[in-house]
Amino acid sequence: MEERINIIVSGVGGQGNVLASQMMALAGVAAGYGAVEAETFGASQRGGSVMSHVRLYKVDSPGPLIPEGKADVVLGFEPMETLRILSRYGNPSTKVVVNTRPVYPIGVLAGEQIYPDMTKILESIEQHVAQIYTLNATEIALTAGNPVVANMVMVGAVCGTGILPIKEEHFLLAMKDYFAEKILAINEKAFRLGMDCTNDAAMV
Amino acid sequence: MSLANVKLETPGKKVMLTGNEAVARGAIEAGMKYAASYPGSPTSEVLDILGSVTAQFGLYVEWSTNEKIASEAAAAASFAGVRSLTIMKPDGMNVALDFLTSLAYSGVNAGMVIMVGDDPSAHSSIKEEDSRHLSKLSRLPILEPFNSQEAKDLTSKAFELSEALRLPVVVRLVTRVCHATSLVNLGETEHVKGAIKAAYNEPILCRPQVHPDLEEKIFKIAQWASQQEMWQYFGPEDADSLVIASGPCTLYAKEALEILGLQDKMGVLSLKMTWPLPEQGLINLLANRKEIIFAEEIDPFIEENITSFAAYHTDQLGVIKFYGKRNGYVKGPLGAGIGELNTDIMIDSIAEIKGLERPDFCGSTAQCLSAVGGSLPERDRAFCPGCPHRASYWVLKSALALEGNDGFVLGDIGCYAMGRGRTGYYTVKSVHSMGSGIGLAHGFGTLQNFDFTQPIIAVVGDSTFYHAVVPALINAKHNNGQFLCVILDNSTTAMTGHQPHPGTAVNALGLEVPAMNMENMISGLGIKVEVADPYDINASRDHVLELLTQSGPKVLILRRECSLVVSKKEKPRRVTVNQEKCIGKDCGCNNLCSRAFGCPANIIDLETGKGRIDEALCVGCGVCASLCPAGAITVEEGV
């Protein structure tokens, strides 16, 4: 077991990334780690960039914020936000799972800003980290029945890639603890769809 | 992280709790029975949590109309022998201060704790304010936890201390403790379930004559803090170089020392009680230290108190070199003493003090933006899709433009403060404090003697209306104020997480209560009041224009439920853009829906240049349909 694992979940307010980070922390605890989880917020429902830090540890509890360049895993809910986070917290050994569906900033919709070329974003991520897995979590979530569960598709994907020492059973345990009965099934379904697509050729 | 964990009656079990949940749990375990608060980030969740376990633990909780009343209510419970808690952010402590500064003089009976959540970097505030100055001013001891476990433990301890000294005790958290989640060892709850008989038997008076007794209490608390060792020390005992830290800065400092390879050379002294200082203990702890670095948020509060203390004790402590915010050695994101600290800032600060290289962990990954031109567009905050405030600001902006006499809008705190920004069309010209817009509006409106002729509008929220606006309206009526007050009534306290207020039909206990009728109240003051639906842009604009022609104070209520609340119910309407009718960039409107209206659900198809609706975001308000010049946006009912 690693002594300390730093995970960043990044995205845009309203994508459910805070919940995803809580799920990572709870699954980490189920796998026998200590965990600290913290989100940046305030803008969390209001279109701003949102980033959560999850730190798993064996012995000594660290502070809630990951130092620059120290992210081991980045779970990116939005391509441009993923690149933004990597430029500050990534390093050449970082592993990345990224949702390829863009969410345009309000300034881009207003025609005042330009959203960077998607191919260039993904190529740059691939070039600068150890591993990248891509999926369209939003589309996959629609097949599960609701775009809202894209967050659990992403959690499923990170589990499926095996880049964390947390097993499927730990995630399932965490979900069962966390979700109310009536919404557990759709979240589990989304999680499995996310896991399944890690077998797809679409992943690089 | 989860309410279920707060409720657990399994002592010894380790669970994940946020700092806010840990404070709630610590209060419950300490036998706290009465809690009152007004919502304010980052602390709003504490009373929400307590409100949902009232039956289980026999609690009374309330959302009061403001923090002063909440403090007074909690103090009364304490006077009557019931342990009580009040919760606020620094802005709320400003409101409560008139009472709190007297409360230390009178003292309390049963333990009373004031939880304050400071917000370094003002993530969800309009200013950075360090509440510790107010606590010290009020002569209230301050405890500062660094994680959830400490938040629970120190909250419980605060009740003991408060009851022993008959003085309210402040537990001060910062945002990164309130909202961060970590493991907490649950304590017993069985013993707190017995019945309590509340009674007020002796008067508890505030009198200037008791000032010497109060100072004696503060002296005793400092002694108690030394005896109880209200600190934690990490690192080699004899280190001559030390970081003195409080709150999460303790953990940032520890990790910074590890990263710089100094953990065996330097110590970290984490203070659990930051005022009054444990002076006796500090004499021993600081003797033989050569240099001290301070790590705290927001102001150099410990720094100023310890350097002053050391100046009086040079015979025991010798000469110590101090490094802090005052002399610019401890940095901040926007300069020393400004903004939230983190491990990176502590690494930078300590590396510079020690003359070390700052390690670089990013390596070549730091260059990953060069492929896209070196920078990325920032994301402006935006009103949520369907937010009635967006429609209201469209109404106000266009009404003032039509009126044509340089009218302006003054605002205050709440979601609608985003009226300063892009999706509020930069309409709001001032934001200071709860209800400040209406007070300023009154001031501007009484400048007629000085040839002031611009129309004035004050916007206030519905929760703010009850918190701070009613006295200002009475003042305006009495002094013949000349302004229009627009109440943006979304039927909830939206910004802080949808807490109830007197205008809602439910209270903090979840009980149904009669919702207050604000138009009756305003009419009762003899002030003209009208109600309109902000989604109906044209009708609302006509109301504004008509009211602006009238003399005296006037009120327009723009009423629509918060779209976040509505979107949790069934989506009632489906909005689409007819691609045939939409003429995109060639339209005279130049993509008015996505360019000007500023709703995240109004997007452009970048290939065709035509408008589209993001169905994942749209809540079906249909306001954009009423604005589209080409009539290309349609609304289908009941899909």
Image (cartoon, coloured by chain):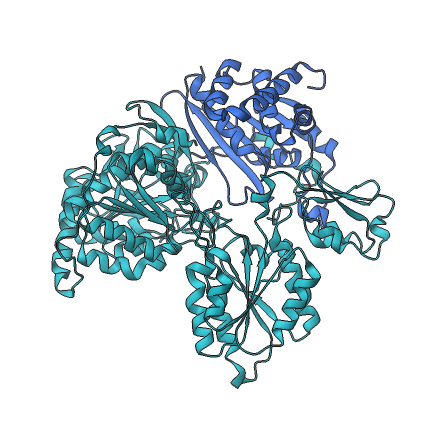
Q: Position of residue A33 (x, y in %)?
A: 41, 20
Q: Is A65 located above or below residue A105 in the figure?
A: above
Q: Nearer the viewer, residue B386 or B329?
A: B386
Within the image, what quadrant is residue A35 found in?
A: top left
Q: Is residue A3 left or right of residue A87?
A: left
Within the image, what quadrant is residue B232 found in?
A: top left
Chain identifier, colour cyan: B
Identity of the residue drawn at 83% across and 40% down? B607
Q: Position of residue B521 (x, y in %)?
A: 46, 65
Is residue A62 something that shows in the picture? no
Q: Is A83 located above or below residue A177 in the figure?
A: below
Question: Which image quarter is the N terminus of chain B in?
Answer: top left
Is residue B303 something that shows in the picture? yes
Tell me the shade of chain A: blue
Q: How many marks?
A: 0
Within the image, what quadrant is residue B16 found in?
A: top left
Question: Which image quarter is the C terminus of chain B in?
Answer: top right
Identity of the residue drawn at 25% across and 42% down? B290
Q: Is B460 located above or below residue B272 in the figure?
A: below
Q: Position of residue A137 (x, y in %)?
A: 66, 27
Q: Nearer the viewer, residue A101 or B372?
A: A101
Identity of the residue drawn at 74% across and 36% down? A117
Identity of the residue drawn at 36% across and 59% down? B95
Q: Is B401 located above or below residue A71 in the figure?
A: below
